[in-house]
Amino acid sequence: MLELLTYPFMQRALLAAVLVGITAPAVGIYLVQRRQAIMGDGIGHVALTGVALGFLTGTNPVWTAVAVSALGAVLMELIRWYGKTRGDLALAMLFYGGMAGGVLLINLSPNGSNANLTTYLFGSITTVSRQDVVVISLLAGFVMLITLGLRRQLFAVCQDEEFARVTGLPVRTLNLLLAVTAAVTVTVAMRVVGLLLVSALMVVPVAAAQQATRGFAMTLALAVSIGVVVTLSGTVFSFYENVPPGASIVVLAIGVFAVITALAAPLAKSRARRAAAAEERCTLRDDVLV
């Protein structure tokens, strides 16, 4: 196990995995609260165009993916506000257009190929460079600054937009900021999990944590813990078994969700029975006193 740390590329991959495991659930908890769990998947489609644009222009694909996916996330928010009945159609065109644009641009690039896109679609532990680690660290720092520094405001907006607006919060600005933060998170995770699977890492750890905890803070802490465990475990497993890390991480996350759900259901029923019994005792006592 320790021999992994003797390989520089695995040191970089494990560090990137930790950052992804922290940031994805930290953003995902707000998306789940807003019932927009699929948003990360849509941003991933759009980010593919940004990756291909990076190859075409000879710049770092991570930065171009950040710019394009952030623009796509803002467009998604605008569609959500103004799209009304045509919103679903507009979003579908945006998602499919992002995927098609990525394939088209990568084939126009003199140094790109569909094989280059595969590493971004499904993740690749061997291609995380030192420069990628620096970029991912900077972006992860931005994500955590927003998700933790504005957690009260973001939670209020995700819980009830109308109430948040009445209290004076800049709802539209916060919504746009959350959308951009989700886009940044997608680009942080694409080297480890892959663009097609990043949405699962945003959602599944949060869904698992919700089965066992109550309250925003505890759910966030447990979701991040699950995210770190599954990203590290999946990355290590992919190294030994030579399988895509994104698939390993997501399968592990779903396995953790299944285990927690199986354990939490009997505990919830037991708590409900105890609460009912306590209420019944209180009622009997009140009747006796009367």
Image (spheres, rainbow, N blue to C red):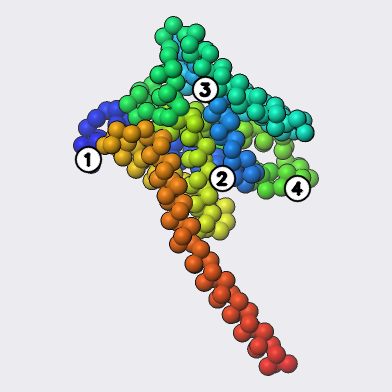
Q: Residues within 10 Å of mark 3 (few under 14, many from 20)?
A: many
Q: Amino acid at mark 4?
A: Phe
- Mark 3 to mark 2 CA distance (whole Å): 24 Å
Tell which circle, 3 or 4, labels the residue nearer the N-terminal end.
3
Residue occupied by mark 4: 163
The structure residue drawn at horizontal position 26% and vertical position 37%, both measured from the top left corner, is: 240
Which residue is outermost to the top? 110
Mark-to-mark CA distance, 3 and 1: 35 Å
- In primary-sequence order, the first of circles 3 and 2 is 2
Q: Is residue 216 above or below residue 246?
A: below
| Residue labelled with disc 3 | 48
The residue singled out by tag 1 in the image is 2
**Helix, strand or loop at disc 4?**
helix
Question: Which comes before the other along the chain, label 3 or label 1?
Answer: 1
For badge 3, the amino acid type reads Leu
Circle nearer the viewer, 4 or 2: 2
The spot of residue 182 in percent (x, y) is: 57, 34
For this rendering, which residue is in front, 252 or 15? 252
Return the disc, 1 or 4, that comes first in the chain's sequence.
Answer: 1
Left or right of residue 202: residue 11: left
Give the residue at x 61% y 76%.
276
Callout 3–callout 1 Cβ contact below 8 Å: no
Q: Is residue 86 visible?
A: yes
Horizontal arrangement in the rendering, residue 112 relative to residue 155 (left or right) = left
